[in-house]
Amino acid sequence: MQFDVFTLFPEIFSSPLDASILKRARESGVLSVRLHNIRDYATDRHRTTDDTPYGGGGGMVMKPEPIFAAVKAAAGGEQGLPIILLSPQGRLLTQEVAGSLLHFPRLCLICGRYEGVDERVREHLVSDEISIGDYVLSGGELAALVLIEVVTRLLPGVLGDPAATFEDSHARGLLEYPHYTRPANWRGWEVPEVLLSGDHAAITRWRREQALRRTWQRRPELLQRARLTEQERLLLEQWQKETDNDTG
Ligand code: 9D3
């Protein structure tokens, strides 16, 4: 998978792409990230990439010409090539959205800065607009890195054990169960006995219940779309009755 990233701050990408999973994916050839500095495509003497907004108001807006020129130079008019703007107004990045991007061999990511980009970039260049959540970043770069990481983890051969990916909490639509490692007793804090029992059926049951309970307590909205067994639905009903009794 190839990402072409358009940014005024390519240096932001160095460390994240040069460590851990993203580093290995690049070394193995599964992932390629090409960084394009938008400033290199500004043609005036000061290589200007931003300007004051028409109509007034504070802040600066990214000029359209250098962005169009950069994308044209890197991607030409390649048919069906997604050109994604990272923006607070985009659709929310989810595991499902990441999965839908997987079948493209190549993606262009435009990172905005300042107050945003000239609207004509959106209207006439961009094919998709993605946000990573409802909080304020200084620009699209960290969001682009999040997108690259989320998508890369889904590429075949990137993670060691595909079964582990499948069991990922978010794959099942639930939060994770609690994890423990040695020592079994640390400062008097014990690991739950069932995990030491060697009874794999009991361990699986315990983990399912823990994952379900956590989701119900912390992210109940996830339960609407979670893939649950009949057993799990009964447990939920039972917990709900218990709370209704306690609070009623
Ligand atoms: C404080 C500035 N805001 C004025 C109302 C608007 C604003 C402009 C530009 C807020 C953030 C940004 C820069 N953010 C991104 O480019 C961005 C982003 C984000 O801020 N949150 C979540 N996802 C994304 S993707 C790109």
Image (cartoon, grey):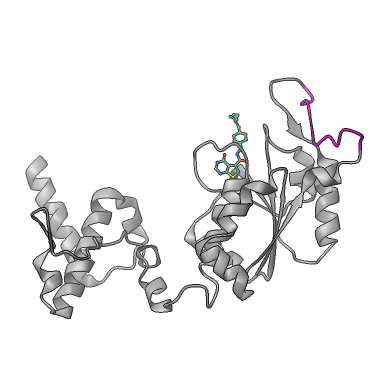
Along the line of sight, which residue is nearer the eye, 79 or 186? Answer: 186
Residue shown at 74%/64% (left/top)? 81
Q: Which residues are magenta?
A: 44-55
How far from the left and from the top, in percent, is residue 243?
12, 48
Q: Is residue 4 magenta?
A: no
Along the line of sight, which residue is nearer the eye, 182 or 178? Answer: 182
Give the dominant element type of the magenta stretch: helix, strand or loop.
loop
How far from the left and from the top, in percent, is residue 14?
62, 53
Left or right side of 51 for 171: left
Residue shown at 9%/51% (left/top)? 242
Which image quarter holds the C terminus?
A: top left
Quick check: can you spot residue 99?
no
| Quadrant hosting residue 209 | bottom left
| Quadrant hosting residue 119 | top right
Left or right side of 62 for 137: left
- How many numbered badges does the structure rendering display? 0
Residue shown at 10%/75% (left/top)? 197
How far from the left and from the top, in percent, is residue 12?
62, 47
